[in-house]
């Protein structure tokens, strides 16, 4: 198993250095995806790559594609470089990098499984975001006919790259905040097993959130509708899978 970290970065210049340092402390090389960041943040990423040329690489997108667009570019780049798995972690410092060994242990024990973080929040979580997640949880449970995915919005996870890149190369998936949810549901539909790893989450160290309360919620609502109709098409298979297990 050959693992790297893929970190989507959009104007998180104040926080990304600490995240990279923490990830590199666990021996993982980092693919930073510059998602059209402003020049100051881009310079920070270039500096990190210069300081650790063997362990940090920058993949640069010419314009902002959204978190999902950045992740898809990073996952493809990781696979092209010969990695078998990619750990996704946010650039804003909200994820607890000390949990990386637990994620990697689970992935090593079951390399065909996607290891997904289940957030354990502190008092920094915005209450609106916290309560809003439950609507997505319910839709995901409906669209998978399963409780296998405990939290589909946590961007701290380990992907097996071959099936994940095959999926994103064959199906149109949302490029913004809808990506994390949609890719999990579609991988589940394709038979991928999900393991849930509890992990502490705090909001964010640099005070920047790129979640657009209006338009990202509109996109996520549209995604749930598309997935619901996709679930109906797959209903016999999903029911058969439940019986077979």
Image (spheres, grey):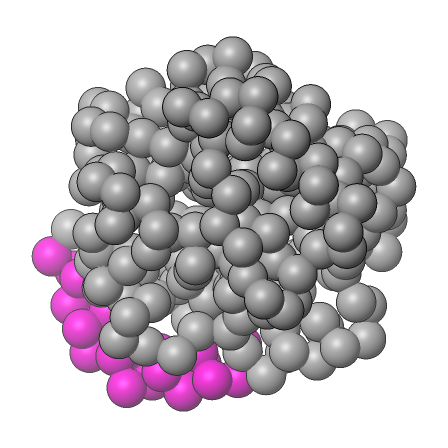
Question: Above or below — where is 178 with respect to 28?
Answer: below
Total marks in image: 0
x 37%, y 32%: residue: 4
Q: Name, please, the residue furthest toward the top.
A: 25
Which residue is pictured at 79% across the width and 45% down the height? 40
Q: Position of residue 231 (x, y in %)?
A: 35, 78
Which residue extends farthest front? 50
Q: Position of residue 49 (x, y in %)?
A: 54, 31
Q: Is residue 24 on the magenta stretch? A: no
| Residue located at (51% from left, 73% from top) | 174
Taking depth in this image into account, of 15 and 148 the one nearest to the observer is 15
Magenta segment: does it hold 237?
Answer: yes
Q: Is residue 160 above or below residue 146?
A: above
Q: Quadrant of residue 200?
A: top right
Q: Quadrant of residue 28?
A: top left
In what quadrant of the picture does the N terminus appear?
top left
Q: Main secondary structure of the magenta part?
A: helix
Quadrant in which residue 90 is drawn: top right
112 displayed left or right of 219: left
Residue drawn at point x = 20 percent, y = 78 percent: 236
Image location (x, y in percent) of residue 83: 25, 38
Query: The magenta stretch spans which residues?
Result: 224-244
| Residue 44 in sight | yes
The vertical placement of 46 against 18, above or below, is: below
Q: How far across and how far down the image is residue 100, in percent?
A: 47, 22
> Does residue 203 show up?
no
Q: Please give left or right for residue 39 compared with residue 115 in the image.
A: right
């Amino acid at each position: 198993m050959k693992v790297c970290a893929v970190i989507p970065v959009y104007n998180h210049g104040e926080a990304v250095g600490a995240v990279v340092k923490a990830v590199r402390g666990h021996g993982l090389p980092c693919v930073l995806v510059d998602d059209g960041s402003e020049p100051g943040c881009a310079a920070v990423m270039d500096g990190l790559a210069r300081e650790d040329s063997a362990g940090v690489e920058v993949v640069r997108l010419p314009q902002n594609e959204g978190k999902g667009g950045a992740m898809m570019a990073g996952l493809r780049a990781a696979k092209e470089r010969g990695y078998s798995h990619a750990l996704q972690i946010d650039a804003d410092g909200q994820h607890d990098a000390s949990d990386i060994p637990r994620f990697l242990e689970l992935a090593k024990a079951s390399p065909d499984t996607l290891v997904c973080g289940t957030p354990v929040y502190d008092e920094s979580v915005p209450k609106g975001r916290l309560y809003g997640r439950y609507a997505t949880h319910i839709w995901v449970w409906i669209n998978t006919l399963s409780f296998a995915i405990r939290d589909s919005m946590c961007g701290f996870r380990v992907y097996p790259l071959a099936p994940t890149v095959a999926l994103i190369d064959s199906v149109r998936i949302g490029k913004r905040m809808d990506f994390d949810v949609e890719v999990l549901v579609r991988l589940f539909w394709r038979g991928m097993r999900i393991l849930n790893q509890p992990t502490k989450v705090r909001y964010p160290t640099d005070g920047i959130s790129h979640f657009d309360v209006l338009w990202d919620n509109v996109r996520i609502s549209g995604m749930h509708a598309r997935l619901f109709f996709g679930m109906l098409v797959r209903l016999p298979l999903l029911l058969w899978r439940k019986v077979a297990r």
